Image (cartoon, grey):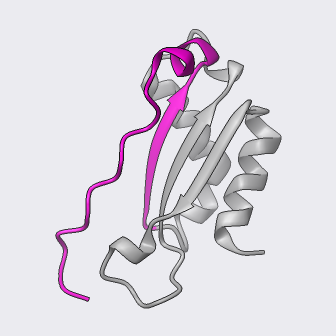
Amino acid sequence: MAVQEEIQTRLYNSLAPLELEVSNESFMHNVPAHSETHFKVTAVSTAFSGLRKVRRHQLVYKELSDLLAGPVHALAMHLFTPDEWQESRGAPDSPRCHGGEK
């Protein structure tokens, strides 16, 4: 299974999100073509209700710990409760990498 699909499957199973978007942003970085190393996760879940941002991130890290120790180099997370999602304008765009030329 591709890394992106594995992230999606694990987060669906653990968080039961109302919304989930997992984007492979590796192309924005100085990595070989077709890499799966840099990801952005936007998730909306009632599992985040009453939790501070750090605790929300810890939940995701726990589910993806082996991937973060292996193929995943970077993970941007935008984690919302349903009410926060209604009030937000969505997740922000990720910045371009300044780590080198392709």
Dividing the picture into quadrants, the one containing residue 80 is top right
Count all numbered tags in the image, as a single digit. Answer: 0
Q: Give percent across and percent down for residue 18.
A: 74, 30
Farthest front residue?
89
Q: Is residue 33 above or below residue 79?
A: below
Whether residue 83 appears in magenta in the rendering, the answer is: yes
Q: Give the farthest residue toward the right.
A: 13
Q: Nearer the viewer, residue 20 or 87?
A: 87
**In the image, 38: left or right of 13?**
left
36 above or below 57? Answer: below
Q: Which residues are magenta?
A: 73-102
Q: Split into 4 quadrants, where in the image is the N terminus?
A: bottom right
Give the image quarter of residue 38.
Answer: bottom left
Q: Is residue 15 above or below residue 25?
A: above
Residue 100: x %, y % from top left: 18, 81
For the C terminus, the quadrant is bottom left
Give the image location of residue 92, x and y in percent: 37, 40
Residue visible at 82% across and 42% down? 13
Q: Nearer the viewer, residue 74 or 40?
A: 40
Please give the name of the residue rendered at 62% of the width and 48% of the height, measured from the top-left corner. Answer: 21
**Would residue 29 be found to the left or right of residue 20 on screen?**
left
Residue 57, horizontal then vertical, whole percent: 50, 35
The residue at 53%/35% (across/down) is 58
Nearer to me, 85 or 100: 85
